[in-house]
Image (spheres, rainbow, N blue to C red):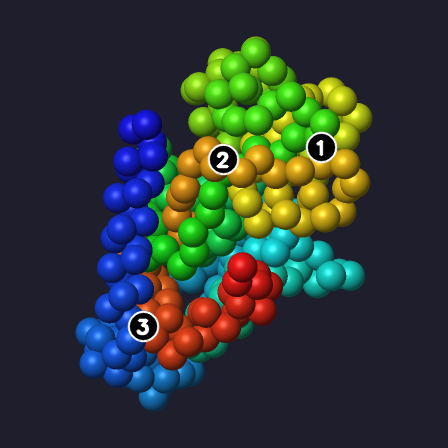
Amino acid sequence: MKKIIAMILAGTMALSMMACAAPAAAPAAEPAAEAAPAAEETAEEAPEASGFTTVADGVLTMGTNAYFPPYEYYEGEEIVGIDAEIAAAVAEKLGLTLKIEDMEFDSIIIAVQTGKVDMGLAGMTVTEERKENVNFSDTYATGVQVVIVKEDSDIASVDDLADKMIGVQLGTTGDIYCTGDFGEDHVDKYNKGNDAVMALVSGKVDAVVIDNEPAKSYVAANEGLKILETEYVTEEYAAAINKDNTALLDAINGALAELKADGTLDAIIGKYISAE
Ligand code: GLN
């Protein structure tokens, strides 16, 4: 329950932010938007002018795990999705070229901490533990941890998971919550969400706990699965940035505020997620 309250708090903050940014685009966006026109005027020297540095000059390097549709996934050789498009829009605002590096989800925070990437953008949930290692930008989307089971499963709610085997993606909040609530012995950890779903299909696990949007993709792609209506935890997604690079954090927040205010963010999300 503690978790849920924390998430609700985070959600309320995000909502009030969005409430500020959305209706009155021009006045509400003023404080956050101030930095950006200045950066645009001197687009060439934007990084120096705004006081932030990036891992590679003129490049915004994003670390992600590109097996998380519709936030990031491969279309041929290219990584596309909500996060990829938001990152491209942020990079453009900052006068940078976007470079995406695909890695295990579990490695993204370390890559941010060790300066391999400028930001982790991976449908990553803001958590207190992660905040000890990285800074998070303002949130840009909400996620829900849901439970996928076989259509004929006797599991009807989160409580029914108690004596079952649950498949999760290693290092995700689904992993953290299930391990905390049901114990290590009841949780099978996979490097990719899809591998956890394959384990469910083949009967190695009884359920998979994962974020709602990828869950929808996996259920659509595999016959005989369903998502339980009862939700496990609601959470907020944000970009993870190195704690020493607060100038980059400010710049990214400034860009995100502009993208929220002018409707770009909603348009990107709407392109991939249809409102129900
Ligand atoms: N939102 C989840 C987390 O942050 C899962 C993210 C992911 O698998 N890309 O842990």
Mark 1–mark 3 distance (CA, rounded to whole Å): 40 Å
221, 43: nearer the viewer:
221
Residue at the far bottom: name it. Answer: 41
Task: Answer above or below: position of 187 versus 248.
Answer: above
Residue labelled with disc 2: 230
Q: Quadrant of residue 26?
A: bottom left
Graded by Cα atoms within 10 Å as few (under 14), some (14 to 19) or many (20 or more), the crowding at tag 3 reads: some
Mark 3–mark 2 distance (CA, rounded to whole Å): 30 Å
Query: Which mark is first along the chain, 2 or 3?
Result: 3
The residue depicted at 71 percent of the width and 32 percent of the height is 151
177, 100: nearer the viewer:
177
Task: Answer above or below: position of 30 versus 150.
Answer: below
Residue type, numbered disc 1: Glu
Residue type, numbered disc 3: Ala
Residue labelled with disc 1: 151
Give the structural element (helix, strand or loop) at label 3. loop
Quarter holding the N terminus is top left
Give the structural element (helix, strand or loop) at label 1. loop
Task: Answer above or below: position of 201 versus 217.
Answer: above
The residue depicted at 50 percent of the width and 26 percent of the height is 158
Q: Is residue 50 left or right of residue 165?
A: left
Q: Residue 177 location in percent, x, y?
A: 45, 27
Callout 1 touching callout 2 (CB < 8 Å): no
Callout 1 touching callout 3 (CB < 8 Å): no
> Can residue 167 be seen in this snapshot?
no
Q: Nearer the viewer, mark 1 or mark 3?
A: 1
Residue labelled with disc 3: 22
Q: Residue 203 location in percent, x, y?
A: 76, 22
Q: Residue 263 location in percent, x, y?
A: 42, 76
Graded by Cα atoms within 10 Å as few (under 14), some (14 to 19) or many (20 or more), the crowding at tag 2 reads: few
Q: Which mark is residue 132?
A: none
> Can residue 86 be seen in this snapshot?
yes
